[in-house]
Image (tube, rainbow, N blue to C red):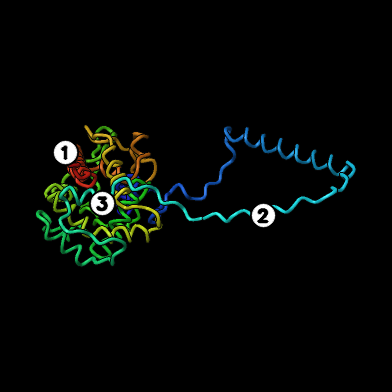
Amino acid sequence: MTELAHRQARQEPALASLPPSEAGVDAQDADVRSTPSRGALPWIAALGAIAIAAAALLAWRMQSPPAPAPVAAAPPTPPAAPTSTAETPPPIRYPIDAARASGAGESSAPAGDAPLDDAALLAGLLALPGGAGLDRLLVTDDLARRFVATVDNLPRATVAGRVMAVRPADGSFAVDSDNDRATVGRGNAPRYAPYVKTLQSLDTKALVALYVRHYPAFQKAYRDLGYPNGYFNDRLVDVIDHLLATPDATEPAALVQPRILYEYANPDFEARSAGQKAMLRLGPENEATAKAKLRDLRRALTTAPARP
């Protein structure tokens, strides 16, 4: 095997095995061409029966004598009132005001859209307790839009590298082999440890306060992504729930190599989203730490103000 093939073979499973999806576009939206499935046959038969009945009715009317003219024409029906085509926005499930009222956001965020001030956002991140060195892990240009696009794409099959808000981990994907059985290498955990440790060290209340303060910019980026009626905080909470639903990794996952790239041997793992596959690659300890922090963030983002 050539050196290039060796390098390609060490790529992480699944993320590179499918073409990257556009931000905000589900991979299932691709043009799929296939023969009709067995489940479609009853519908095809029904459409054929309707077509035959319509043809028979048309032939009968063409052969029948015309109906006598009516004595008096009925008054014309007034045109129906135009209906609004505007889509009704879905109800907001996790209003950002709840996070602010719970004490996570000390300063009120202005209503409506706000300009994307990436410099202020990055400065706020670096100033957080535990935030030192975040600029070495993040792609700092167009930071707000990258964050929104990354969050939106994590439940999908792939995340396009050009929209990622986080830099790739150092080193190459490690694979352990034992008697022709390949598994996710234990050497991967140290590669991901800086990300997990930084996430763990960030003060949850201060982090959510910064998010609330810049929320109008995130909301604008989400609308610009193609969700004019969407609410980004709802999407963020849904994605956190999706990541928390990742199976707990109790041992290194088995891999197969049908061609050049590695894939998970477990079909359930291989069918999972880009975000859940990333969680599985963290290793048991890193995954448990990441999930604990995600639960803390979810509580801070969804806590409603206490009633008097």
Q: Secondary structure at mark 1?
A: helix
Total labels drawn: 3
Instruction: Please tell me whether residue 236 is drawn above or below residue 44 in the rendered image.
Output: below
Q: CA distance from mark 2 to mark 3?
A: 46 Å
Which quarter of the picture shows residue 177?
A: top left
| Horizontal side of residue 21 vs 239, given as left or right | right
Task: Specify whether residue 175 is in view.
Answer: yes
Callout 2 amino acid = Pro
Q: Position of residue 113 (x, y in %)?
A: 31, 63
Task: Specify whether residue 187 is in view.
Answer: no
Q: CA distance from mark 1 to mark 2?
A: 70 Å
Q: Position of residue 30 (x, y in %)?
A: 48, 50
Mark nearest the camera among 1 and 3 is 3
- What residue would you read off at disc 1? 285
Crowding near pointer 2: few (<14 within 10 Å), some, many (20+)? few
Say the numbered circle drawn on residue 78. Answer: 2
Q: Residue at x 40, y 57 (%)?
A: 228
- Considering only order in the chain, which callout, 3 or 1, is on the residue closer to the N terminus? 3
Say the numbered circle drawn on residue 96. Answer: 3
Of the pair 130 and 99, the residue shown nearer to us: 99
Callout 3 amino acid = Ile
